[in-house]
Image (spheres, rainbow, N blue to C red):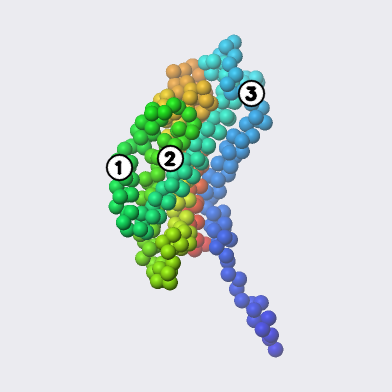
């Protein structure tokens, strides 16, 4: 005779959501490559002092505009500063700005979108304010905000975050407008659940996916915006080693010292590409149809 335990032993094991998401991510070659590249750049930036770098602010007038050598792997700039050290340390600024803007814009814009989409009286006023911000090009808004204050990494993060918040709020609002019509939301309301409980217990978990995916693209956009602001002198102080500042310093010397332009531009391009590739993979994971792909 076959016992009850024997019947249970042949039942198929259901794959959990976490395993399914991990399998989908690992099958997405672009996401794996992008995540790996981003991890490498993040590790290099964090371990910069241990990677045979020198002080990126140290000026050596006698070593100005030197080519690649054993002492200066990438050469030196017009002030004799080691270009390798400045490029490595410059990754800290770009990654810090990218991750900080992605977090702030996603958190604030997400909250605005949640309440605008669920609480009808707030929808009109909040969205009109967001529409007003979206009518201004993000880079122009960031320049204006930075111009009103002194140039610093903190002010650049705040300025770019304000420019990105409306896009997140619009995205989340659209998701909430769809979710609030679902039967389980109506059931929760009919059982006496308050607006805050419905928003944070039932709607927010289902909106996390689009928010995370959008955050990756905001991160890439923020790094480009920071480089653009620094390039035109409206971002981080010129003394700060950032990829945008290095590009700005090298634009007049690119014919005699192309490494000053090529190296920071290549680092910025590869990092932004890696973030976008990672975002594509996360988009597949959080897409229910993507989870079902084999």
**Residue 239, image x and y in percent?**
51, 22
Whether residue 249 is situated above or below residue 113 in the rendered picture: above
- Looking at the image, which is closer to me, 216 or 164? 164
Residue corresponding to mark 2: 161
Residue 59 occupies quadrant: top right
Residue corresponding to mark 3: 54
**Residue 46, image x and y in percent?**
61, 36
Secondary structure beneath dot 2 equals helix
Q: Give the residue drawn at x 40%, y 44%.
A: 165
Q: Give the residue drawn at x 51%, y 41%.
A: 99
Q: Residue furthest top?
A: 62
- Looking at the image, which is closer to me, 280 or 175? 175
Residue 173 occupies quadrant: bottom left
Residue 32 seen in render: yes
Whether residue 87 is situated above or below residue 212 in the rendered picture: above
In the image, which disc is placed on residue 188?
none
The alpha-carbon separation of the residues under discs 2 and 3 comes to: 32 Å
The alpha-carbon separation of the residues under discs 3 and 1 comes to: 46 Å
**Residue 52, image x and y in percent?**
66, 27
The answer to whether 1 appears left or right of 249 in the picture is: right
Q: Give the residue drawn at x 33%, y 54%.
A: 122
Residue corresponding to mark 1: 132
The alpha-carbon separation of the residues under discs 1 and 2 comes to: 15 Å
Q: Of circles 3 and 1, which is in front?
A: 1
- Looking at the image, which is closer to me, 9 or 153? 153
First-in-chain label (1 vs 2): 1
First-in-chain label (2 vs 3): 3
């Amino acid at each position: 005779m076959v016992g009850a335990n024997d019947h249970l032993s042949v039942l198929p094991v259901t794959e959990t959501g976490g395993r399914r998401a991990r399998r989908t991510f690992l099958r997405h070659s672009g996401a794996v490559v992008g995540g790996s590249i981003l991890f490498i750049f993040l590790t290099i930036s964090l371990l910069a002092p241990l990677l045979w770098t020198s002080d990126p602010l140290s000026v050596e007038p006698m070593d100005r505009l030197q080519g690649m050598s054993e002492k200066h792997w990438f050469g030196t700039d017009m002030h004799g500063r080691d270009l390798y050290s400045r490029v490595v340390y410059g990754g800290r600024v770009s990654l810090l700005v990218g991750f900080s803007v992605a977090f702030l814009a996603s958190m604030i814009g997400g909250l605005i979108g949640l309440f605008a989409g669920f609480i009808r009286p707030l929808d009109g006023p909040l969205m009109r304010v967001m529409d007003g911000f979206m009518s201004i090009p993000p880079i122009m808004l960031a320049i204006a905000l930075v111009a009103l204050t002194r140039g610093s990494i903190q002010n650049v993060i705040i300025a770019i975050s304000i420019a990105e918040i409306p896009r997140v709020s619009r995205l989340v609002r659209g998701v909430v407008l769809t979710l609030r019509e679902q039967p389980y939301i109506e059931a929760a309301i009919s059982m006496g659940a308050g607006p805050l409980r419905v928003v944070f217990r039932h709607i927010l978990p289902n909106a996390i996916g689009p928010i995370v995916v959008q955050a990756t693209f905001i991160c890439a956009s923020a790094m480009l915006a920071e480089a653009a602001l620094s390039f035109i002198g409206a971002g981080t102080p010129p003394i700060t080693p950032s990829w945008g500042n290095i590009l700005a310093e090298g634009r007049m010397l690119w014919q005699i010292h192309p490494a000053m332009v090529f190296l920071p531009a290549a680092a910025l391009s590869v990092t932004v590409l890696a973030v976008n590739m990672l975002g594509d993979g996360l988009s597949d994971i959080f897409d229910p149809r993507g989870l079902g792909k084999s």
